[in-house]
Image (cartoon, helix red, strand yellow):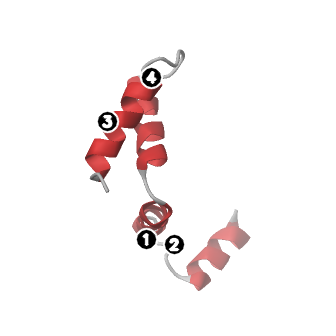
Amino acid sequence: MKSLEERIQIELKRLARKRGLSEDERLLYATSLAETPDERWQRNRQFLKSHGLSTRSALKKYALSS
């Protein structure tokens, strides 16, 4: 299997033809399309952890306070 960076470059080439996307959006979409389900899951867990929402009780507290 190719590395994530190689897969991202492939997706960036595919997205180059799409109009209306900024470079940041292209990179975000390319990364999401290139990642395997396990890689996406890990990235989502890191995002939640960076916001202090890595535990079930923290998620419940956040949901109730919004």
Label 4: few (<14), some (14–19) or many (≥20) C-alpha neighbours in 10 Å:
few
Would you place residue 36 above or below residue 64 in this image?
above
Amino acid under disc 4:
Ser
Amino acid under disc 3:
Gln
Q: Which residue in the protein does label 1 denote? A: 49
| Mark 3 and mark 1: Cα distance apart in space | 28 Å
Q: Which residue in the protein does label 4 denote? A: 22
Q: Secondary structure at mark 4?
A: loop
Q: Earlier in the sequence, mark 4 or mark 1?
A: 4
| Mark 2 and mark 1: Cα distance apart in space | 5 Å
Q: Residue at x 27, y 43 (%)?
A: 6
Looking at the image, which is closer to me, 61 or 19?
19
Q: Earlier in the sequence, mark 3 or mark 2?
A: 3
**Callouts 2 and 1 close, C-beta under 8 Å:** yes
Q: Residue at x 60, y 84 (%)?
A: 57
Identify the image quadrant of the N terminus. bottom left
Q: Which residue in the protein does label 3 denote? A: 9
| Mark 4 and mark 1: Cα distance apart in space | 28 Å
Q: Residue at x 53, y 15 (%)?
A: 19
| Mark 2 and mark 4: Cα distance apart in space | 29 Å
The reply, left or right, for residue 66 in relation to residue 58 is right
Q: Earlier in the sequence, mark 4 or mark 3?
A: 3
Label 2: few (<14), some (14–19) or many (≥20) C-alpha neighbours in 10 Å:
some
Q: Secondary structure at mark 1?
A: helix
Residue 53 numbered mark, or none: 2
- Camera-near label (3 vs 2) is 3
Q: Earlier in the sequence, mark 2 or mark 4?
A: 4
Amino acid under disc 2:
Leu
- Camera-near label (3 vs 1) is 3
Label 1: few (<14), some (14–19) or many (≥20) C-alpha neighbours in 10 Å:
few
